[in-house]
Structures are given as structure tokens and as C-alpha cells.
Image (cartoon, rainbow, N blue to C red):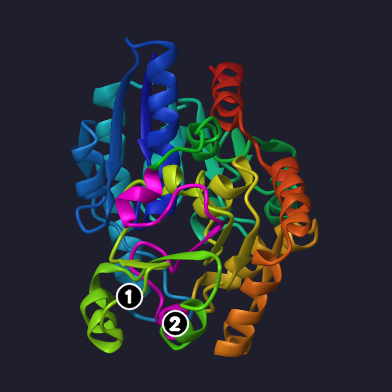
Amino acid sequence: MKVLLSGGGTGGHIYPALALMRRLKSIDPTTEFLYVGTERGLESTIVPNAGVPFKAIKVEGFKRSLSLDNLKTVQLFLQGVFKARKIVKEFAPDVVIGTGGYVCGPVVYAAAKLEIPTIIHEQNSIAGVTNKFLARYVDKIATCFEEAQSEFGKNSSKVVYTGNPRAQEVAGIQPSDALKEYNLKPGVPTVLIFGGSRGAKAINTSFVEAIPAFSKKDYQVLFASGEVHYDTIVEQIGEATENISIVPYIPNMPEIFANVSVVVSRSGATTLAEVTALGLPSILIPSPIVTNDHQTSNANSLVKHDAAKMIAEKDLTTETFIQTIDELMSDPEKRIEMSRQAEKIGVPDAADRLIQVIKDII
């Protein structure tokens, strides 16, 4: 089988595609892949580094207000469709899967017009503009949140709830001694705090102000600041205490997830797929600057099932930050119940569900 993947801009669009690829490869090592992205997006480095053949096209997103820039965007889209059509014809895939980001627009559209089976995968509870555009052309729409079905209107009959393939990759990870890598003790209750791969200023500020309180707790704190913020934070606080570890980035995040008691983070789709697959209690602080405030909607999908607590960034203070963490870290029974609820929401066979959708349309 030959599979063409497309998705770009952020890791949230790229990692599900790569997780699906790895699962397909494990089932049938002869499966061939091609990934189409942009030269400017993270995919231009992440995908080749993963050993996946990569081709780039140029495309930009539409502005939400009327603008002359949109004329340029339309021109780039049409040029992108022309180039994508050529790439698709040359690779001759059995299926084309778009996982979000503007680059999917011309790629999936071109494939659909060539009558190649197509799927879009929507990670968030509120659909992106590109996936909404593509919905009328594709064969199936895979979603990670059941609430997303209503986003596709008259095309909602195409929706299949599959979950995020990243969930299946992390679902089987077992506790280990991984916390030793961060100078923390395995087996001790631990809260993990991070604001995404690049960090989040509001979360970082709350953490720094909470350090005096955290240093007196009987639980451990592992904090990832983001590379760009790390040096400044270390200068601000000096040496960390025995129960607090501060790092710029955690490359083995799923392994660390399996060894902590509570996660405090943004509510991006990939993070939520991973914490629910592992049944982890979480405190979610949605980013207020994402399109359509979709992270708040993502977080609410867990909160309404008592699988997570949420703090809106406008309500985030040092006091609410410490208090909310303390409430969970001091109540093992509450954590167990939240863990059960998170696990109920998780989709540990998400990649296999998506593979079944592929089989159904080719």
C-alpha cells in the first residue's frame, strides 16, 4: 500500500500522521509513504528526521478579514493544487490523509479531484478552516472529539470517531525509573508542569512565583520551561530545590507522563490524547490565542467528565495555581477517580481505528 500524508505548521498536525505511519509500518513493513508539507513549517525538519520521504509546496492561510493578502493566498492555493496534483500523480497513492494545517488544502483537494480515496483527520473539538473546506470533497472525516461531528454540518455523515493515533503509541507505556534523568525520585508523587514545546509565559510566571511554596511540599515538581525561556528562569530563581527539577524541554514526554501523578499543561489535542490514553489527572490552562479558542473547548470535553480541572488564563494567579495543584496532590482518592474518568475518554486503539477507515475506503 502507498500512503500520502499531509499536515503541517504545528506538531499537533504532524505527530498524529507519524504515529499512524509507524503503526501501518509495524503491520506491513512494505507500506510506502510520502509526506507533503511546507518548507517553513515544523514538518520540514521533523518529517525528514523521522526518515520519511518529504516534498514541499508553498501555501498560506486565509486572513479572517477582507484583505488584499487573500488574493495572494488564492493564487498560492491554485499554484499549490497544480504542484500537489503533479506530486500525487507521480507517487500514485492508494489513499491520501490530511491531518490539518493549510498545506492539506491543496494536497487533499487535488487528490479528491483525481478520485483517490481521501481522509481528513481533525484533532480538535472545533474544526480548523482547512478541514471544513475539505469536508465536502473527502470520503471520510476522522475526529478525536465526539463533539467535533457537529462542526461539519451537512457533511457530518462522513464523520468517524477514531481518536488520535498518538494515543495508541503511548497507551502501553509502563512506569519506570525515568524521573531519575531529571534528578527526581521514582515512586514519589510528582506533578509535571509545562506549557507546550516552546513554553507558555503565563504558566512559567505562575511556576516561578510558586517555587517558594513548592519547595516545602511533600511532592515533587518537574517543570519544562521551553528552550527560549529557560536561561531567564534559571537566572531568576537560582538553584532549584531538592524536590523541584527545571528543564528547558522533555524529549521523552510520554515516558514521563507514565511516571507522574498530575499533569499541568495547555490543552492541545496531542497532549489530551496522551493523558487520556494513560488515564492521567490533569489541570488544563488553555491557550487563549489559538483559533476559535479551540483549546478551551478541548479542555471542557475532559472537565465535563470530571477527568480534568481547568483554569482560564485570565483567572490564573499564583494562588489559584498552587491551590488547584495542592487539591489534587493532597487527595489520592480524587486522583484515582479522575484517572478512571480520563481513561474512559481515552482511545488506546486510535491508530487501528483510523487504519480500519482506510481499509473501508480503498
Q: Where is residue 288 in the image (x, y as percent from the top left)?
A: 54, 79
Label 2, label 1: how many angstroms apart (C-alpha)? 9 Å
Q: Picture quarter containing residue 302?
A: bottom right
Residue 270 visible from this viewpoint: yes
Q: Picture quarter containing residue 283?
A: bottom right
Residue 113 visible from this viewpoint: no
Q: In this view, does 139 lie above or below 2?
A: below
* Residue 191 among magenta residues: yes
Determine contact: label 2, label 1, CB under 8 Å. yes
First to last magenta residue range? 178-206
- Horizontal arrangement in the rendering, residue 258 relative to residue 79 (left or right): right
Q: Position of residue 54 (x, y in %)?
A: 21, 37
Q: Which amino acid does label 2 sit on?
A: Ile
Residue at image coords 79%, 59%? 306
Q: In this view, does 103 lie above or below 110?
A: below
Secondary structure beneath dot 1 equals loop
- Horizontal arrangement in the rendering, residue 328 relative to residue 111 (left or right): right
Front position in the image: 215 or 181: 215
Q: What residue type is labelled 1?
A: Ala
Q: Mark 1 points at which residue?
A: 240
Q: Position of residue 355 (x, y in %)?
A: 54, 23
Q: Picture quarter containing residue 303?
A: bottom right
Quadrant for the N terminus in the image: top left
Front position in the image: 147 or 63: 147
- Label 1: how many Cα within 10 Å (few below 14, some 14–19, many 20+): few
Which mark identifies residue 211?
Answer: 2
